[in-house]
Image (cartoon, helix red, strand yellow):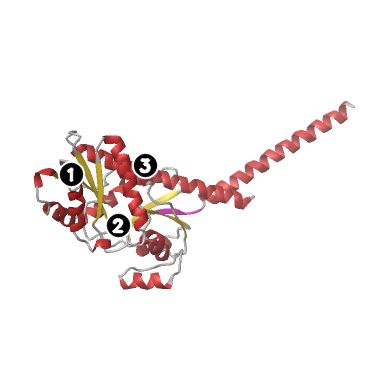
Amino acid sequence: MKLIKSFILTLVLSLTIFSCNEKKQSTSEVAESISGEKIGVLLVNHGSHSKQWRTMLTDIEKDVKGQIMKSGEITEVRTAFMEYTEPSIASQMKKFDEENYDRVIVVPIFLTISSHTSNDIPNIVGLANDPKVKEELKAEGIETYSSKARVTVTPLLDYPTVLKKNITRRAKALSNGSGDEGVALIAYGDAEFNQQWEEMVEDIGRYLKAQTGIGSISYGWCGHLVRYSSEPTKKAIDQILELEERAIVIPVLVANDEHFQGEIIQNGVDMVEDQKRVVYKQDAILPDPNINKWVVKIVDETMTDLRGDKEVATK
């Protein structure tokens, strides 16, 4: 009887050890398959002729690279400009292929949804194949490229939290605290997604009012939607000055561009009759450490999702 009990105990222990080892092996295989992939990150932005603008975007890469690569799973972080200048998205994707990357995580650094993020980028990286969009891109001199590496595009910038805090900080810095001020928000705009852009600036405006006590908010566009005109900026300022003593002008633009902040918006400010009532600083959303944190966070979340997909695939 003792012999039988001993045999049963030995058998149970053996099965338990085997089961644990099998689970460990399965987990190990998943880990190896993830770490075995050569993964790169591509930070994608609109692009500009302005060197100052481009530097602000490449500075993000410098600031986040170490944090993104510290785990060892991601071995490269690069920046690409959608148009106007190199390195382009296509040239960077080619480079990843030349270096035998298995996967590239594309992080679009854009304010909100636009034709660029919904149509252009997916077609540029080979995730979509719309002949009309590709023809338009070709006409603009933008190269498309279907990479060998698998491509994952992350969600867009978390503007509800990041932008609200950014613009509130900038408005407070220009405010005199009199309580008789308003803010004119000047953004790029997008004809195809005008509703989303309006919702974005209106949402920012409501937050700004709640956080600062500023009484009036207006907004205007400065991009291709209004043919790069200064008139909408002047109009937005005039709307504030009809209600308040001072108008604070805030560019809702990713980076500082001599053409937009220095000419289009500045000219709109200069067109206002009473200059003493207008406060304007040629600044931009960048630099902002919260955007750098968001980039690191969204890459980390994407990697977590990819690990989850791998685990499901191996079961």
Of residues 142 and 192, the one nearer the viewer is: 192
Q: Identify the secondary structure beneath mark 1.
A: strand
Q: Is residue 39 magenta?
A: yes
Q: Are marks 3 and 1 in contact (CB under 8 Å)?
A: no
Q: Is residue 71 visible?
A: yes
- Mark 2 = which residue? 189
Marking on residue 313: none
Q: Residue furthest front?
A: 242
- Mark 1 = which residue? 247
Disc 3 vs disc 1: which is toward the camera? 1
Q: Identify the secondary structure beneath mark 3.
A: helix
Q: Is residue 149 left or right of residue 65?
A: right
In x, y percent, where is residue 227?
23, 64
Which segment is the magenta one?
A: 37-41
Q: Main secondary structure of the magenta part?
A: strand
Q: The disc labelled 3 sits on which kind of residue?
A: Thr
Q: Is residue 214 magenta?
A: no
In x, y percent, where is residue 118?
41, 60
Marking on residue 161: 3
Disc 2 vs disc 1: which is toward the camera? 1
Q: Identify the secondary structure beneath mark 2.
A: loop
In x, y percent, where is residue 109?
35, 52
Of the numbered discs 3 and 2, the one sitting upstream in the chain is: 3
Q: The disc labelled 2 sits on which kind of residue?
A: Gly
Give how far apart the Cα atoms at labels 3 and 1 are.
Answer: 24 Å
Residue at horizontal 20 percent and vertical 34 percent from the top:
179
